[in-house]
Amino acid sequence: MKQRIVISGRGGQGVLTLTQLVAEAAVAAGHEVITTETHGMAQRGGAVLSTVKVGSFHGPLVGPGDAEIGLFLHADNLPVHGHYLRPGGAAVVNGSGPLKVDSVDADRLAAGVGQPRAANLALLGYAAGKGVLFAGPDLFEETIRKTAPAKYRDQNIAAFRAGVEASR
Amino acid sequence: MTRHVLMGNEAIGRGIVECGCSVAASYPGTPASEILEAVVAFSRETGHKIYTEWSVNEKVAYEVALAASYTGKRAAVAMKQVGLNVASDPFMRSAYLGVKGGLLLVSADDPGPHSSQTEQDSRFFAMFAKIPVLDPSSPREAKEMVGLAFELSEAYEIPVMLRPTTRVCHARQAVPLLAPAQEKRTAHFEKNPKRWCATPGFVLGLHRDLTAKIERLAADPRLAPAFFPGDGTRPRTCIVASGVAFAHTWDVLDDLGLAGTVDRFQVRAPYPLPKEFIERIHASYELILVVEETYPVIEMQLADRRIAGRVSKFVPNEGELTPEVLRAVVGKFLGLSASAAIAGARPVGTRPTLCAGCGHRAAYYAISQTFPRGIFPGDIGCYTLGMNLGAVDTVHCMGAGISQAAGFYHAYAQDGAEFPTIVATIGDSTFFHSGIPALVNAAFQKARIIVVILDNSTTAMTGHQPTPQLGVTASGEPGRSVSIRDLALASGIAFVKEADAYDVEKFTALLKDADRHCRSADGGVAVIIASSPCVLAETGPARAPQAVRITEECTGCRECLDMFECPALVWDDDTGKVGIRQAACSRCDVCVSVCPTLAIVVDEGAPA
């Protein structure tokens, strides 16, 4: 099993948290994983990109046209980082407008469970529910349960589940 | 033994704790900032006691760690690559004098660069100083190399550099965790003035010792490159790579289905390169590709004109060796037909900007509005982004803003005409780092400049490490607070004022006062300390209860967007006016003063 995932968003949208979560889930599933993320100046409101490579890879970067999956926390990032997807790759986008790709209003789903900051998890739930990721929703939910801070755990799981529901 | 997903910097921090290190010092800087934080966290978690500090700068950090090593204890110092420029003075000499307890220097490079003033290669610095350098290709390897670095450092009494790059520092991978070494060392400094005070008469002998050490190190099998033989389908052809470029080259070869067809060497210690390895490359290969970041350190030691590398311009001489670049390089080297480039232009993403409600924005707005013809030397930190607001004209290196302001003044003043208002801005952490000597110098040399110290009580850009005036140490213990105001007064500066930048009217009046002071008969440096806690810090300002809204008076002139650039103010294509993203707004109310048609108002009645 080899899968290259790019996670794109704006500084402050929880791209780093989502990257770590996907990496932890990959390890829990018994896969090798290597990721990279954006820090420093670029985080100040700019477009940020993380990559997750699941399986027997050595370096963390994903080349243009190489990613099987793209998780876009902001629809405006699609033109910025969309070229990392390979032809036929799956883009899953947080957005409500008329988009040509698979999209879900993760902001609304997260707000609906009282945790607007967990839109990243709602988007993950949606992608996991669609079956495009290396594992199904159960593994990711279990990973959230293990890694989320206690005070956010229930709301984070609720946001994730709202995403899974929306995928059905 | 358990495995945890760790960031490269966490893996390095964990390695430092596991190796029984006693003293660790650092100054934050991307991509190295998380190393000391990880040392603190793992020290606490494992119960292995380490003295840790965020030093005021990298030179100080290096000297603190160096002296700890003189006592026989293991010590580590971590910084970003340009930090080593600051620490280069103690660093260069420490190679000659050597160490006692293992001394690990982590200098994190930033090919690209992503968050740095240069993409310089610290491995050249190691070569310049004649000390060994290890070049990890992954977080896991970085942690292993911490152990090797301490062993080598003690065996040869020499500082050892670990040189991770951004893609190792900020990569995450499952890393095995071990218990910290249970060795108890007590501090014992053995006096030896011929060594520790080495006057020039002793230095020549120390230099001979150093050369002998580096020659023995070059023959140490622990520093030999790793060999991954191909299946013979490409005879007399090899790829020599180091660092994360080795890892990405492997992935590129895998993608091409060619991984097993070519001989590969991973150079783990780019300096000193073993003589035996150099001879083997010369004798056994005709087609040689060298892939390394960012300068040709291995290639120049191999000194073979047949090499396809940076010197021969086969590999681009600038920028990061991404999979995209390596695909082209490896394809060309192996004689593959060029694959089609990925179609589609790459639009530039949103440019970085100061956060909504950031006090720096308020200060910059007032500075650029008050002195439309001013010169504004800036500095390194979040507030570099003042360049977007027309209030930062130069950004050079840590602390340069104040010295450059003085330089501008002297250059203009000697012409005899009226000199422009010169406003240097510098953050609190940068001020402590290297702004203090610059301020003392400017005051003493009678430079007529305004220095605005943007005090947000933290090192914000790198993740909120505490600064000296906060009086909190790296491990969270209370330290002794150092006052910026007192330092300015002690420099003999007559005009030192503290101000709230959010109060645009008062702050503007103060800037004008400062300008008058500069131009008065006995004027000189004017210091304004603009205090506003970072909006991202846990101790950041509380949101005011009332919201800000935009009235029908908005003419869509875009003044607020262009001159103030707050991320909470957004253009609405449908209405042709500006709107407010309430979720982003921190309710600092400064934009109320920015709108020329008074269309931005505080909504007293609106709920939060």
Image (tube, grey):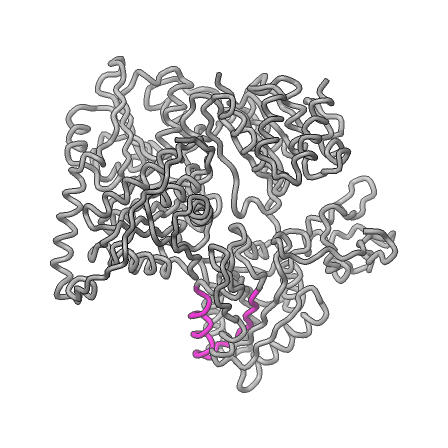
x and y percent of residue A75 in the render?
68, 32
Q: Nearer the viewer, residue B225 or B282?
A: B225
Q: Is residue B183 left or right of residue B608?
A: left
**From where the camera sits, is residue B454 visible?**
yes
Q: Residue at x 36, y 23 (%)?
A: B332
Magenta-drawn stretch contains B195: no
x and y percent of residue A60 in the render?
45, 30
x and y percent of residue A162 in the render?
72, 27
Which quadrant would residue B181 be assigned to in this image?
A: top left
Which quadrant would residue B508 be assigned to in this image?
A: bottom right
Can you say which quadrant of the picture contains the N terminus of chain B?
A: top left
Q: Is residue B29 above or below residue B434?
A: above
Q: Residue at x 87, y 52 (%)?
A: B552
Q: Is residue B103 left or right of residue B383?
A: left
x and y percent of residue A36 in the render?
49, 34
Q: Nearer the viewer, residue B287 or A9?
A: A9
Q: Residue furthest bottom?
A: B521
Q: Is residue B122 above or below residue A159?
A: below
Over which residues does the magenta segment extend?
B434-454
Q: Nearer the viewer, residue B235 or B360?
A: B360
Q: Is residue B196 left or right of residue A43?
A: left
